[in-house]
Image (cartoon, rainbow, N blue to C red):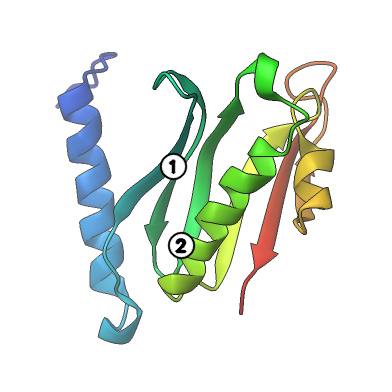
């Protein structure tokens, strides 16, 4: 047996699949839900991407991976609109919880303004900044 320092997309996806298989074996059937990637985009009148939100839904919750709005469109409410769209989708799919992480130089106050609560902080990560973990209970 040997351990190799190597990353490939295929190997990463296989490892993820194996962990998900193991997790599904541990859960009772009534908690098993599909693992679904989701996202919503913001486009201008010419079809150019100006923002978006991505996440993953499973076990009746959503983890937000990324929320981005082009600098020229920030402070106009588009971040909240994208977040609300994802929350509506979560509720329509019987999700109980949404959670995410963000850094102190990003948007913890934005998420708090939108009803998210901090449930954890890694201080001085990266050095000189903090990493926040936030959640919003839907049910």
SS for callout 1: strand
Residue 69 shown left or right of residue 1 in the figure: right
Residue at (82, 32) in percent of width and height: 123
| Residue 113 at x, y percent in the picture | 83, 50
Residue 116 or 29: which is nearer the viewer? 116
| Residue 11 at x, y percent in the picture | 18, 28
Residue at (44, 72) in percent of width and height: 92
Residue 138 or 119: which is nearer the viewer? 138
Residue 89, numbered label: 2
> Is residue 57 depicted above or below 1 in this figure?
below
Residue at (30, 73) in percent of width and height: 26
> Is residue 131 depicted above or below 24 in this figure?
above
Q: Indicate the quadrant containing the C terminus: top left, top right, bottom left or bottom right.
A: bottom right
Residue 40, numbered label: 1
| Residue 61 at x, y percent in the picture | 48, 64
- Whether label 2 touches label 1, CB < 8 Å: yes
Residue 89 shown left or right of residue 129 in the figure: left
Residue 72, numbered label: none
> Quadrant location of residue 6?
top left
Residue 125 shown left or right of residue 9 in the figure: right
The Cα–Cα distance between marks 2 and 1, rounded to whole angstroms, is 10 Å
> Quadrant location of residue 7?
top left
């Amino acid at each position: 047996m040997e351990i190799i320092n190597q990353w490939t997309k295929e190997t990463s996806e296989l490892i993820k699949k194996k962990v998900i298989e193991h997790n599904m074996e541990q859960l009772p059937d009534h908690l098993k839900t599909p693992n679904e990637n989701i996202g919503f985009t913001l486009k201008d009148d010419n079809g150019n991407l100006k923002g978006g939100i991505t996440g993953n839904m499973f076990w009746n919750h959503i983890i937000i991976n990324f929320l981005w709005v082009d600098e020229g469109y920030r402070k106009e409410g588009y971040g909240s609109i994208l977040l609300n769209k994802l929350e509506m989708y979560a509720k329509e799919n019987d999700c109980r919880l949404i959670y995410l992480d963000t850094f102190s130089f990003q948007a913890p106050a934005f998420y708090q303004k939108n009803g998210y609560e901090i449930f954890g902080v890694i201080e001085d990560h990266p050095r000189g900044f903090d990493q926040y973990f936030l959640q919003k209970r839907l049910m």
